[in-house]
Amino acid sequence: MTTAERTRERRLTTARAMVEGIAQEMRRNEEVFVMGEDVGAYGGIFGTTTGLLDEFGPERVMDTPISETGFIGAGVGAAIEGMRPIVELMFVDFFGVCMDQIYNHMAKIHYESGGNVKVPMVLMTSVGGGYSDGAQHSQCLWATFAHLPGMKIVVPSNPRDAKGLMISAIRDDNPVVYMTHKGIMGLAWMAKNARSVGPVPEEEYEVPIGKASVAREGTDATVVTLSLSVHHALDVAERLSGEGIELEVLDLRSLVPLDREAILESVGKTGRVLVVDEDYRSFGLSGEIAATIAEEDPAMLKAPLARVAVPDVPIPYARPLERAVLPTPERIEEAARGLVGA
Amino acid sequence: MSATHLKPTPANSLTPSTIPRESGPQGILRATSSCRTFAAKAPSYPPLPSRIWLFVRQFVYYRKGGVMDTSTRLSLYRTMVRIRAFEEAIRREYYVGKQPVFDIGAGPVPGEMHLAAGQEPVAAGLCAHLRPDDALTGPHRPHHIALAHGVDMKRMTAEIFGRESGLCHGKGGHMHLFAPEVHFGCSGIIAEGMPTACGQALAFKKRGTDQVAAAVVGEGAVNQGGFHESLNLAALWKLPVIFVVEDNDWGISVPRSASTSNFSATDRGRAYGIPGERVEDNSVEGVYEACGRAVQRARRGEGPSLIEVHTLRLWGHFEGDAQGYRESELEDVPGRDPIPTYRRTLIEEGLLDEEEAQRIRAEAEEEVEAAIRFAKESPEPAPDEALEHVFA
């Protein structure tokens, strides 16, 4: 068996892949450290730091008080001094108690300083719903962050990208918000998508920030999406393929910078686009993609752009209510059929 | 020492009539013109004390535990005068182009302007103990501590003027001054510079250096979450950080008594296990001594301290603030000006005479005017620069 074959064979969950990326960077660079709530002995509520405490000790894997303004701000301060903190905000929904440190400090100091101060920090956070956690623990909110200048936003959908994007994020001289959907982590305690476990190379590698990836090639329509919705879109694409409808699935992987070129290239090829977004519908990612196409050449569309997103309501608790608002495979399939006229 | 018995007649302070008392542009205009009128008045100084009296004063000073040498005391004075000369010049320039109708966005220095006249003792006393490799974060009113910490005056002035040669190439402005060469930064958001200082202190601690970080905030900051979260983190992690609260009695127009349940922020510090001292009377030597203890404690790895200084906001919250809410105390304000107070002390003790005081002031003015010239002569940034530096 060749090395390449062994690498292909080794499969990790997304969470394990993230941890491996963090650990490799921590071994390589003394200035990298992790802090956040329950990142130590617990190993991160979503498994993002499991095992790091054992290897690196409490000086480099620091449990913090429930004090997001304090410790995210401390991350900013440490980054200003040249360290490379990875700070976990347990749920992105908690940004309300600490957004000032994120958007007024972490994201702006480089610009405000005229480029003289760098803030090389990773803000790692979990997003998304689908398991009845209610309105304050189920949001994606990536467009909220992407709207505010100065932060790169990465949103991996699979283990291989998760590791490579983590390494890129740590090495980046900018603040990077690293958002993972709970449904792609491969958690033992949550129903998981089959693709939340996948092949991950053992060596260090980077996945470039700002580059989308074609998760599936197709000719009839492009599904532009990210995170857990990539998997739903792939499932739908496989089903429709049996009927002779070939969807192309574009996994954005980063929101900032947004790979507009990849979007336009794919849409230029298929002439039809469906945006699937687990964030709120209005004033968000789907509108940004529509604008990107409209600004380039509205004539490239053979049919009006379609979107499946969370309608502009908070995420409800009860299962049928939550399923009604999330971009489920059923909603995606219906929209895709409508788009291609099938 | 109490300042109330001193006559408020120094050349570099303002009388109540110079402080805007009416809302709107008229009040502002009156303030600036009064400023000029006053500057033309001849200063009067007390006679020099006799040698015997000087000996008694020095004896009393040492008996009280005074340990400062003469050069340190004169250096504190020079720092304060340098800051005052700067703030007065910025104030003068700020009103250029804002007359006869006040427009906050007009003139060579646009935007809000929060000047720190009266709060010089905090900057001088604290920064005398900081090295250029120590970190310092300032609030929205940052000029005094920036200058005292060694931020380049010319480039800082150019930043306030929004020029290409500014510290931040015109992207920051007066509330967002960054000088990484002396680890200086600012936040215009109340209390939010404190977590940054904690993080800088955390980096120093992790690296095992003896650097310290200090965060200066106003007394209005002590009711913010960021204040409490920072105190807890600093105490919990025993960070080499010094929190300095400038209690100037006013959170814009709201007095401390109407905003804060405790008399002193040091009580809150103690609740988190952080030792603290409150310095009364805006005493620069009191600040110097308290901050000295706090900085040494941090350098020795013994954790954070909190120093609160009862200081004085000599002017409005921002320029153009008519201060109607403060009318009853404005008459006393000039008498509490820390600079003439300290000058009088130094003169009484024979460490300074009028001639030397004037020379110190003239030197400061010369430096400040050179900085203003540098700023004015510097080009404005090209508009397309606005798109640069979002990312490194």
Image (cartoon, rainbow, N blue to C red):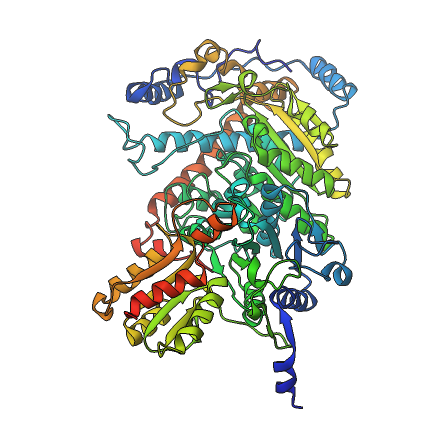
Q: How many marks?
A: 0
Work out whether residue B134 can be spotted. no
Location of residue B167 in the rendering, given as x and y in whole percent from the top left corner: 45, 48
Q: Tell which of B232 and B121 is nearer to you.
A: B232
Q: Tell which of A11 and B339 is nearer to you.
A: A11
* Left/right of residue B346 with respect to residue B96 in the rendered view: right
Residue A54 found in image quarter:
bottom right
Above or below, comparing residue A108 to residue A247 in the picture: above
Quadrant where the image shows the N terminus of chain B: top right
* Left/right of residue B176 with respect to residue B214 in the rendered view: left
* Left/right of residue B229 with respect to residue B339 in the rendered view: right
Location of residue A115 in the rendering, given as x and y in whole percent from the top left corner: 46, 55
Location of residue B183 in the rendering, given as x and y in whole percent from the top left corner: 58, 48
Above or below, comparing residue B263 to residue A117 in the picture: above
**Residue drawn at the location 40% of the way across and 48% of the way down:** B171
**Residue drawn at the location 62% of the way across and 25% of the way down:** B309
Location of residue B222 in the rendering, given as x and y in whole percent from the top left corner: 59, 28
Residue B215 found in image quarter:
top right
Q: Tell which of A194 and A56 is nearer to you.
A: A194
Above or below, comparing residue A213 to residue B209 in the picture: below
Above or below, comparing residue B286 to residue A243 in the picture: above
Q: Tell which of B380 and B228 is nearer to you.
A: B228
Residue B61 found in image quarter:
top right
Work out whether residue B321 can be spotted. yes
